[in-house]
Amino acid sequence: MTAIETVNLTIHYGQKCVIKNVNLKIPENVVFAIMGPSGCGKSTLLRSFNRLLELNPNAKVEGDVRLYGRSVYDMNPIEVRRKIGMVFQLPNPFPHMSVFDNVALGLKLNSLVKSKEELREIVEWALKKAALWDEMKDRVREPASALSGGQQQRLCIARALAMKPEVLLMDEPTANLDPVATEKIEDLIYELKEDYTIIIVTHSPSQAARVSDYVAFLYLGELVEVGKTERVFEKPENGLTERYLTGRIG
């Protein structure tokens, strides 16, 4: 089944076209990597999936994005962002809030829990899903600012998971992390695909090869090639893809 589909998706920033007529189908319960050099439109494409681009007054979107066959433009944007969660490049926990309150905030704001016990259970569940519970179970009342960068990023993942999304978007989630923290996030991504469709943006072909089941190569706003990761890396069909994978462009 297709989780996310784009139909003739074109995106402008002012007069500049940054995404050019992209048609893409992303299956459910896979890790789907969007790779390409910096400035090629990867993050813009990702943010179109959950209507975050609407927060940019200069962005104009044409075409359609569908979640399980339903246009996201027929849905309330708050509902869209609950169903399609987002983890950003820089960990962005609320630093003066506790670990617990960071995960609980969205649940409280959206009135998604009926009791303190239910709230506690969901926070614990989300921290376990994000592979953070064992490290933080005795420290959930500490401020998020006390965590390492890798822990903060996993906290942001827990915060997104607490909302019970169907799709999880990750915009270069390891770009600012050390190798040990990066490995933990990559292991987590692999585990989460059993329950979620994960779409990750990366400028690293090696990361795409490690974590993804499917990959799309985006170049100058155009979708150059898409397919199963193993096939694209071993037998790219487009010369541009081969040049990118071998480091001759990008």
Image: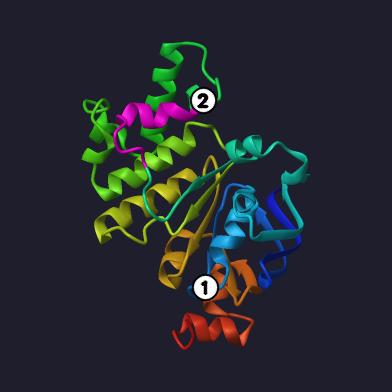
The residue located at (70%, 60%) in the rendering is: 60
Asked where in the image residue 218 lies, by quadrant, the reply is bottom right
Residue 62 image point, x, y percent: 76, 60
As helix, strand or loop, the secondary structure at mark 2 comes to: helix
Circle 1: residue type: Gly
Q: Give me the residue at 49% from left, 85% from top.
A: 249
Pick the residue in front: 230 or 243.
243
Disc 1 to disc 2, C-alpha distance: 35 Å
Q: How many marks?
A: 2
Tag shown at residue 39 = 1
Of mark 1 and mark 2, the one earlier in the sequence is 1
The verdict on residue 99 being magenta is yes
| Up/down of 95 relative to 8, above or below | above
Residue found at x 42% / y 42%: 157
In this picture, which residue range is highlighted in magenta? 93-106
Is 188 on the left or on the right of 233, as rendered?
A: left
Q: How many neighbours does mark 1 have within 10 angstroms: few (below 14), some (14-19), or many (20 or more)?
A: some
Magenta stretch: residue 204 in it?
Answer: no
Report the amino acid beneath label 2. Leu
Q: Position of residue 140 (x, y in %)?
A: 27, 27
x and y, in percent, of residue 94 in the image: 35, 37
Residue 127 location, x and y as percent? 36, 33
Q: Is residue 96 above or below residue 247?
A: above
Q: Answer left or right for 133 relative to 111.
A: left
Q: Residue at x 68, y 72 (%)?
A: 17
**Which of the numbered marks, if any, corresponds to residue 109?**
2
Quick one: label 2, few (<14), some, or many (20+) residues within 10 Å?
Answer: few
